[in-house]
Amino acid sequence: MRHLPEMVVVPKGSFMMGTPADEPDRFKGEDPIHRVSFARPFAVGRFTISFDEWDACLADGGCGGIKGDDRGFGRGRMPAQGINFEAAKLYLTWLSKKVGRTYRLPSESEREYFARAGTTTPFWFGNTISGQNASYKASIPYGNGPRGMDSKGPAVVDSYAPNPFGLYQVHGNVFEWTEDCFNKRYNEDTPADGSPWLEGDCNKRMLRGGTWDWMANMVRSGYRENATVGSHHSFRVVRTLNVQP
């Protein structure tokens, strides 16, 4: 089957979710740091869903006929944009039926875990960032990093180097939906097992990754953003694996 998401198995493990007080340009709401543990490996889309993949759903009569919005940047291998939360769920329903396995959105903790890929720095590639690493507003430097040229738009989904888990563009380019409802900061009710946080304001959902026209501090691994379910972004798919812990 053409134009279906390529998946990567992310290993089980644990990590400290959130950002330390001394991380440059961090925001309130990224703390307190807390341990999240994943008892089983899970599968993650190697790339953000592309328009090729979204259009395959449309061509097959799925996705509610919602075309998305490429904002003039083109379709094909460009990240699918203009996708609200419920539209993303329509794609997941179609994909699950097509493949015969259940696909879903990542939880916010899964998204940070696979973005970090075993690292503890602001970005998986280190303490700073440049235009060689990601699509973002590089004219404003981060920490001791260089000043560069701003991205002119999103990049195709397989641009830049993959992180240690084999995942592309976990920083910048386009915001990706997670399943979690909006909570201003972590607290004692924050799930510690990798499951989504489905309490709080569920008319808003958490976004991760940042976007091509935002500054570096907003594309860090620990950066949290939220949006109403009707707003338009992109997403990456996840699949639970039936394996023993």
Image (spheres, rainbow, N blue to C red):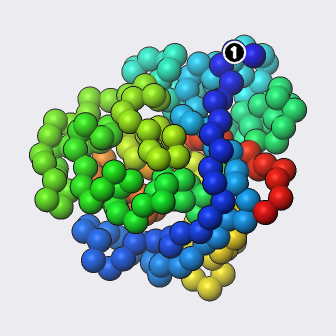
Quadrant into which the C terminus falls: bottom right
Looking at the image, the residue that sits furthest to the bottom is 188
Residue at the image point whose x is 13% and y is 59% from the top:
144
User: Could you tell me the amino acid type at mark 1?
Assistant: Arg
Q: Which residue is mark 1?
A: 2
* Closer to the camera in the image, 66 or 116: 116
Q: Vertically, is 120 above or below 53?
A: below
Q: How many other residues sit within 10 Å of disc 1, few (<14), some (14-19) or many (≥20)?
A: few
SS at mark 1? loop
Is residue 16 in view?
A: yes
Against 47, residue 195 (above or below) is below
Q: Is residue 79 left or right of residue 54?
A: left
Instruction: Examine the image and state in which quarter residue 74 appears.
Output: top left
Q: Please determine whether, in this image, residue 109 is positioned above or below residue 52.
A: below
The spot of residue 165 in percent (x, y) is 52, 46
- Residue under the point 73% across and 28% down: 63
Where residue 143 sits: x, y (%)? 18, 61
Front position in the image: 170 or 118: 118
Quarter of the rendering occupied by the N terminus:
top right
